[in-house]
Amino acid sequence: MLKRLSDIFSNFFGSLFGGKKKDLPSASHDKVPGLMEDSSDVPVDTIETINVMEVNIPVADNDPGPFADPDKEAAIETEPSTDPTPEPEPPIDPTPPSTGTDTSEPTTPPPPAHTPRFLWCLDNGHGKLQAGKRSPKWEEDDQEKQFFEYEFNRDVVERIKKELTKKGVKFFDVVPDYLEVGSFLKERVDRANKRESDLPKLFVSVHSNAGPAAVGKWVSSSIKGAETWFAKNSKKGKKMAAIFQKHILDQTGFKDRKLKSTQIKNLYVLVKTVMPAILTENGFYNNKAEVLELMKDSVRQKVADAHIAAIMEIEKNGL
Ligand SMILES: [Zn+2]
């Protein structure tokens, strides 16, 4: 009954926002009882908030050791895949091909290469066909505009990937293409969990936020800023969240909405991943002023730069 009501609501919401619910692939995995997809789905009265400064971030030793996250309950779904042909994995090795041994011209020695320390599972969040997850429409230069969260998340992750490739940091793109999918939530987590890696894995899910507002309306102008989520019992997740939130505030100047966690109605990607995980919410796309910022190339680059800075800090110091 609840599921039925939820489906009706979801369809209604989607139709109002122009979502193509009828085009979605099987939505059976899009809603997981008791688990939410991102911050905007979590009931406000269940959220616990702490300041970045409250998290002690000691410099870790150089041995990350075995790196499943023992501090949170997480499990890989064990049922076998029904698809006999596994999806080809995207190439993740950022090392460019060798250019041979041409010694005809003197060259300055290259700087020492970065030794990768982790495999960063980068989750760009949401599918193209997912209902909701978009701003109200507005007019600008005689054109109708609308912000789509999946597009922002993917753009930011593309920028992060580009820089990590240059820096020699290892990553795994959880959703490499603009797949014609809905939420893709369970698959995103499964792909990260099942990804084999000699390096310890860390999971970063990139989002922008939506506050409570009437359907098709903008949220109150005071609801704005950035927050970073971690699984409540994960010490490493909490430490990661503090490092990312610090860099996001430094780079973007967004209002500090602090570090957030919850025990009830938790976020799927935080509790179902078998590695330390965080979810960043970078500004509100249904805040009429902040969405204009999120549309800017310069602001998107700052959001990406903040994530890169956090990743490089953890690559350097460990976790
Ligand atoms: Zn989201």
Image (cartoon, rainbow, N blue to C red):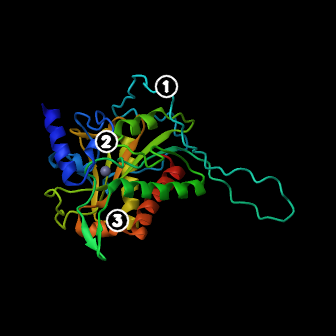
Q: Residue furthest top?
A: 79
| In the image: residue 215, left or right of residue 227 | left
The answer to whether 139 is drawn above or below residue 171 in the figure is: below
Residue sitting farthest toward the front = 22
Callout 2 environment at 10 Å: few (<14), some (14 to 19), or many (20+)?
Answer: some
| Mark 1 nearby-residue class (10 Å; few <14, some 14–19, many ≥20) | few
- CB under 8 Å between discs 1 and 3: no
**Mark 3 or 2, which is nearer the eye?**
2
Q: Pick the residue in front: 171 or 25.
A: 25
Picture quadrant of residue 4: top left
Q: Quadrant of residue 264?
A: top left
Q: Residue furthest bottom?
A: 141
| Nearer to me, 43 or 316 | 43
Instruction: Residue at 13% x, 33% y: name it.
Output: 2
Pointer 1 or 3: first along the chain: 1
Q: Residue type at mark 2: give it.
A: Leu
Q: Secondary structure at mark 3?
A: helix
* Left or right position of 218 against 291: left
SS category of the residue bearing label 2: loop
Element on which disc 1 rests: loop
Give the x, y percent position of residue 169. Answer: 56, 50
Q: Is residue 164 visible?
A: yes
Q: Which residue is mark 1?
A: 84
Can residue 48 be seen here? The reply is no
- The label shown at residue 294 is 3
**Residue type, numbered disc 3:** Leu
Name the residue carrying label 2.
24
Which numbered disc flags the more N-terminal residue, 3 or 2? 2
> Label 1 amino acid?
Pro
Sequence-wise, the earlier of marks 1 and 2 is 2
